[in-house]
Image: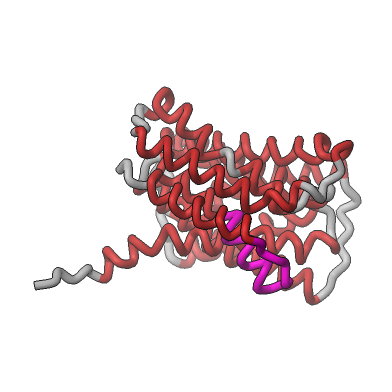
Amino acid sequence: MTQKTSPPAMAAALLPWLFVLLWSTGFIGAKFGLPYVEPLTFLTLRYAIVLVLMAAVALVLRAPWPRSARQWLHIGVSGLFVHGVYLAGVFTAIAHGLPSGVTALVVGLQPLITALVAGTLLGESVRPRQWAGLALGFTGVALVVAGKIASVPVHALLAMLVPAVVALAGITAGTLYQKRFCPSFDLRTGSVIQYLPCLVATGALALATETMQVRWSGEFLFALGWLVLVLSVGAVSLLNLLIRRGGAVHVASLFYLTPPATALIAWAMFGETLGGLALAGMALTAAGVWLARQGR
């Protein structure tokens, strides 16, 4: 007799793939919105709207707030790294001309770095099968974006890469910090606490370094709305759930799927070509993520 999977178990199994799909659209949202606004100003607007929305939801639903100042601090620090540092690096890199695929490749180092330090910081052991999966996944990501790298002038590549490396440091440090110090918190009030320092820090940097001017258009409003509702509310809530439930390496491996998923979305929306090398890379990436997630 075939054993049926319960609806809650099916929903839990689908969460990682829904997260990858939603998270991958962030690069597309940036591509739509950045022609109309500078990167830090764009993020400041995004954080302000998310804060208003999530604060209203938390108050209306009477969601519980952390009881200790220490927990407030841990949640705020994790948010500043996961959202503030990461997104500022990604948006700045793309705004300065680095192709989204190359940006994704740099950030794609996160699972490997997470695996290297997870044992020391979190006491997690990384099995040989997981190491093999991480290496295979990164190889696949490299193949997917190989064609994009050739389009970047060598003399400008280093300056463009700096904000992408900052983004890599932010998302890696943030997920490790959150897993260790605040893996579980209410998603409604936690979002408010996470985005508040992002708004303050990013707004101050935007005020100091940018004109903070916006060319309002339908395309920009669509991009802003998408990034607020789908990314900052939807995808980030899923990321927090995954961090709560899974090991650091287990969660980080999902980021390998972002570049292939982004490439597929760009192919469907913008007609960007997918060569045989990219398709082979997608297959390798999927196999690598499957191996890396077998260590639970």
Image position of 60 with respect to 165: above or below: below
Image spot of residue 102 (x, y percent):
71, 47
Q: How many marks?
A: 0
Prevalent SS, magenta region: helix
Q: Residue at x 82, y 46 (%)?
A: 152
- Residue 32 pos. (x, y %): 76, 66
Q: Residue at x 58, y 38 (%)?
A: 109
Magenta stretch, residue numbers: 258-275
Image point 43% across, 65% down: which residue?
61
Give the percent coordinates (x, y) of residue 12. Answer: 33, 61
Asked if 76 appears above or below 1 in the picture, the reply is above
Quadrant in the rendering for residue 183? top left
Residue 62, given in percent of the width and then of the height, sits at 42, 61
Residue 147 visible:
yes
Q: Is residue 79 visible?
A: no
Residue at 63% in and 38% down = 168
Quarter of the image where the N terminus is located: bottom left
Q: Nearer the viewer, residue 281 or 290?
A: 281
Q: Quadrant of residue 35?
A: bottom right
Q: Please name whichever residue, 278 or 96, is drawn nearer the observer in this view of the structure.
A: 278
Is residue 263 shown in magenta? yes
**In this rendering, is residue 16 above or below 223?**
above
| Image quadrant in which the C terminus is located | top left
